[in-house]
Every structure is written in C-alpha cells, then in structure tokens.
Amino acid sequence: MESKIERMESKIQQIVKKLLQSEECLPMLEKMIVDEVLNIDILVTTMFEVVDTLNEQTLTRLSTYIAQYITTHKSFSSLEEQLVNMNLHRQQLMKRILHNI
C-alpha cells in the first residue's frame, strides 16, 4: 500500500517538474491543488528541486501563490522554512551569476 502511494507521489512530482518548465504552469498547478490532485507540500518540494531552472517570472508567481495559499489555508512552518531556504538559494545563484559576468 505504501509503495503505491509513493509511486503516485513520484508520478505527480514528475508531472509538476514538467509543468514548472512550461510558460503557463501556474493555472494548471492551481487547478491541481484546488482539485486536490496536488498537495501544496509536493509543489514546494518539487519547486525547490528545480529552482535553478525556473525563470524569474515563474519563480516569483509561484512563490507568491504558495505564500498566499499558506496564509489563507494552512500554516506550514516547514513549508515556510523551505520557501525561505529557496529564496536564499536563489539569491546565492544570482550573486554567482553576477559575479561571473
């Protein structure tokens, strides 16, 4: 039973990774969350895994959406911590990029 759930979560993560690479990913991700196909925890975890490949606009929109979702629906201290870590990671990447220019 547990392995079936893990396989389903893995498939959902793969779908989310592909969606995150598309230009108009937010409406589809929002629909998946509203329809309870996607858990916000999985979205944040997956987003953190691919943060290096996201463009600035997508990253900003997703971060804003997740922050709004967390404040209006639930309080996830671990998710808030992940968002802070992701933002720090992004800042470090930007510093490295600017340093190499």
Image (spheres, rainbow, N blue to C red):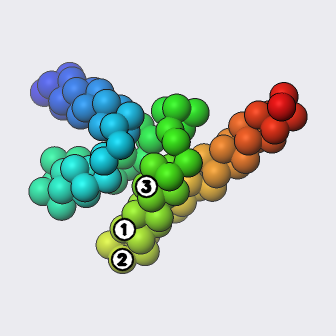
Whole-angstrom CA distance, mark 2 to mark 1, is 5 Å
Residue type at tag 3: Leu
Q: Amino acid at mark 2?
A: Thr
The answer to whether 55 appears left or right of 71 in the picture is right
Tell me where residue 75 appears, x and y as whole percent.
Answer: 43, 69
Near mark 1 (Cα within 10 A), the count class, few <14, some 14-19 or many ≥20, is: some
Q: Position of residue 82 (x, y in %)?
A: 56, 50
The residue indicated by pointer 1 is: 69
User: Pointer 2: what residue?
Assistant: 72
Say whether residue 33 is visible.
no
Task: Indicate left or right for 58 with 39 as reference.
Answer: right
How much space separates mark 2 and mark 3, taking CA atoms?
A: 15 Å
Q: Secondary structure at mark 2?
A: helix
- Tell me which numbered mark, 2 or 3, is placed earlier along the sequence: 3
Query: Please, what is the three-letter code of the amino acid marked with disc 1?
Result: Tyr
The residue located at (84%, 28%) in the rendering is: 100
Q: Are marks 2 and 1 in contact (CB under 8 Å)?
A: yes
Which residue is depicted at the point 16% across and 47% down?
37
Residue in view at x 18 percent, y 56 percent? 31
Q: 31 above or below 98?
A: below
Query: For the view shown, which residue lies furthest in the right direction?
Result: 99
Image x and y of residue 85, in percent: 64, 48
Location of the N terminus by quadrant is top left
65 to 46, vertically: above or below:
below
Q: Quadrant of residue 93?
A: top right
Q: Of all residues shown, which one is farthest toward the front?
A: 101
Q: Position of residue 78 (x, y in %)?
A: 51, 54
Disc on the earlier residue, 1 or 3: 3
Residue 19 seen anywhere in this rendered image of the structure: yes
**Mark 3 lies on residue:** 62
The label on residue 45 is none
Q: Name the front one of labels 2 and 3.
A: 3
